[in-house]
Image (cartoon, rainbow, N blue to C red):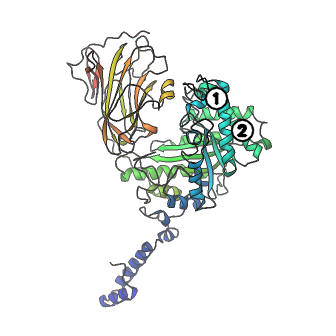
Amino acid sequence: MNSKRSLKQLVSMSSKSASRQALLLSLSVLLVASLLNNGLFTAIAATNDDLPPTGMTFEHYPALKDEYKDYFSFGIFGRGEIEGLLYNYASYTPGNEMKPESTQREKGIFTYTSADNAMKAYSDRNSDMLFYGHTLAWHSQTPTWMWDAPPARYGQSGEFDRETALENLNTHIENVLGYYGSRLEGIDVVNEAIGTADPADWRASLAKGEGWYMALGWEWVEFAFLKAAEVVDRNGWDLKLVYNDFGLDSPNKARVTYEMVKDINERYADVRPNGKPLIEVIGMQGHYNLSTNVQNVEENIKLFATLPGVKVHITEMDIALPPGELTPENENNQGMKYAELFQIYRNYAAGPANTTGNPKVIETVKLAGVRDVRDGWKGGEFAMPYDYDGHAKKALLGILYTDKFLATHEYIEPDTDQEQKQIDGVYVYDTGNGDSWSGANIILGNDASQWPWSTTDEDGKVAFTPEKDATYRLSFNYTAKGTSSIRVRWIKDNSNGGYTSADGAHVNSYPYSANEVAKHIPAFFNSGMVNMGSYTLTSEIKLEGSQPADGLIGNIGIRGGGGGNAFSINWIKVEKVGTNGEPDTLLVNWPEGLDDDIHIGRKHQIKGSIRTVPALPTSLPP
């Protein structure tokens, strides 16, 4: 029916048909069309038991900041489409503009223009917008001269001198916090200090082999908080000091964080006025996906709530989906995951709307954007409540109508009936196939007498064992589905994140374009590629046996640049290079496997079958 017809026309039509039922039907259709045309569907959603439809733009739904104002402050981390940002968010935290490389790239030269402009853009439109800071001390996006890493610069030795690094740390915090402190509600003083989590030893868990730890050891965290507290308390600001980290849905990492904050706060209990703890807030980065265990999230919030005077902020929140296509099943399941998590957040909210009797510890929740994005952080992973065009997804309904959404929806089991491609020592992961991350691990050794820097997982399988002084070429083809930069890295084992110490220190030191052959690992392929393109990337390296254990050696990992997961690996080859400088022996061929006549004596599993062929000679010393 034409929704533009007048009521008089409808009545006339009904009298001609002599049908009262037709009149009532026509009036109903006119009412619904009028409501849709005038953007008033939200009004009827509030008066019945049905959820509003998805697919409309932000102004047709209640503002997130208004719906949650009595629970916690609802904010954004990083930039986003400005109209939706101003409508939905009560606070803004800059994603990159306040990081050390942005505020003090050159020693002693402080630049605040980027962060100032970002904050002004929002405060000009909303004078009530609150601001948070991110971040003062971090191992990444920080000039390495700050901790006096080689080479020597700015009159520094370049030898991780402790006094030099501590002076640099204090100077940076004094200046950046001194400039922004009066305008902020809180600031991430330290970001992502924990490496491999050992719940029995939080100090050892900080040994990431990179950043401030290299010069200051485990004490660097408390040094940063002590300086930040000095600046804040001297000025009398009401500004929360935050420790921020990812992966705090992991029980082990949460326990390390708890032990660290507990120990530091107890040792410095009398440092701050009015009984304030040195570390006032734990920031739980919410970088989640469909496999995230929400029960772990809740248990870890409850653990942090036992720390005297310590609050919780949910920061950088997103729920990534498999890239490629936004399926109805994944959209539904993302809505479920958002709803489950926000139900937990409400049950531990610091505001008066939380009447559960649970600890009231969550002061703010910050999403990591407004709309889905095609590239950049979580590009192609459909992680936000609105789609590329700004239309609401079920994720928005899960956040706004948490209880009702959970009462009317359930998880839909996706179709995962896919053939598993098995090659010994080669492990390929793809979020598009339901894995929690995308990338690959190539296991090089499990015998310390032959390859002393590398270990396998429990199955003991390896791709091959390298020879001393041999040169190897790694080639792989991938398709960018949002993630258009790739890192080839040294890893300790078959985990995601277990990088060797020297790899972590040099991860961004060797950038390459897609058409170059990398002569170093780690290699950072960060140019010459665009979203939805497919590229073959090549690294060639000589292993001469002098590399230190847990240093610049290990197993080989293929990872998305900046932690991105929106890509698929199509094939992988590893070849030994002969004396003529060209590859002459194929060692790894995923997913097809090796032909019987290429190698003789080594066991190799190909799609479930076992082939036996000659073992590779090994001469690398223990």
Q: CA distance from mark 2 to mark 1?
A: 21 Å
Location of the C terminus by quadrant is top left
Q: Position of residue 257 (x, y in %)?
A: 62, 34
Q: Position of residue 610 (x, y in %)?
A: 27, 22
Mark 2–mark 1 CB contact (< 8 Å): no
| Residue lying farthest to the front in this orientation | 155
Three-letter code for the amino acid on which mark 2 is drawn: Leu
Relative vertical location of residue 410 with respect to residue 544 in this rendering, above or below? below
Whether residue 162 sits left or right of residue 521 in the image: it is: right
Q: Position of residue 305 (x, y in %)?
A: 66, 42
The front one of 215 and 491 is 215
Residue at 57 percent across and 41 percent down: it is 99
Location of the N terminus by quadrant is bottom left
Three-letter code for the amino acid on which mark 1 is drawn: Ala
Helix, strand or loop at label 2? It is loop
Question: For the residue carrying disc 2, how many other residues have a C-alpha within 10 Å: few (<14), some (14-19), or many (20+)?
Answer: many
Relative vertical location of residue 111 with respect to residue 32 in this rendering, above or below? above
Q: Position of residue 379 (x, y in %)?
A: 42, 47
Q: Quadrant of residue 201?
A: top right
Q: Mark on residue 330?
A: none
The front one of 372 and 412 is 372
Question: For the residue carrying disc 1, how many other residues have a C-alpha within 10 Å: few (<14), some (14-19), or many (20+)?
Answer: many
Q: Residue beneath label 1, please?
A: 165
Q: Mark on residue 278?
A: 2
Asked if residue 369 shows in the view, the reply is: yes
Helix, strand or loop at label 1? It is helix
Residue at 58 percent across and 61 percent down: it is 67
The front one of 513 and 318 is 513
Which one is earlier in the sequence, the residue at label 2 or at label 1? 1
Residue at 72 percent across and 43 percent down: it is 309
Asked if residue 344 shows in the view, the reply is: no
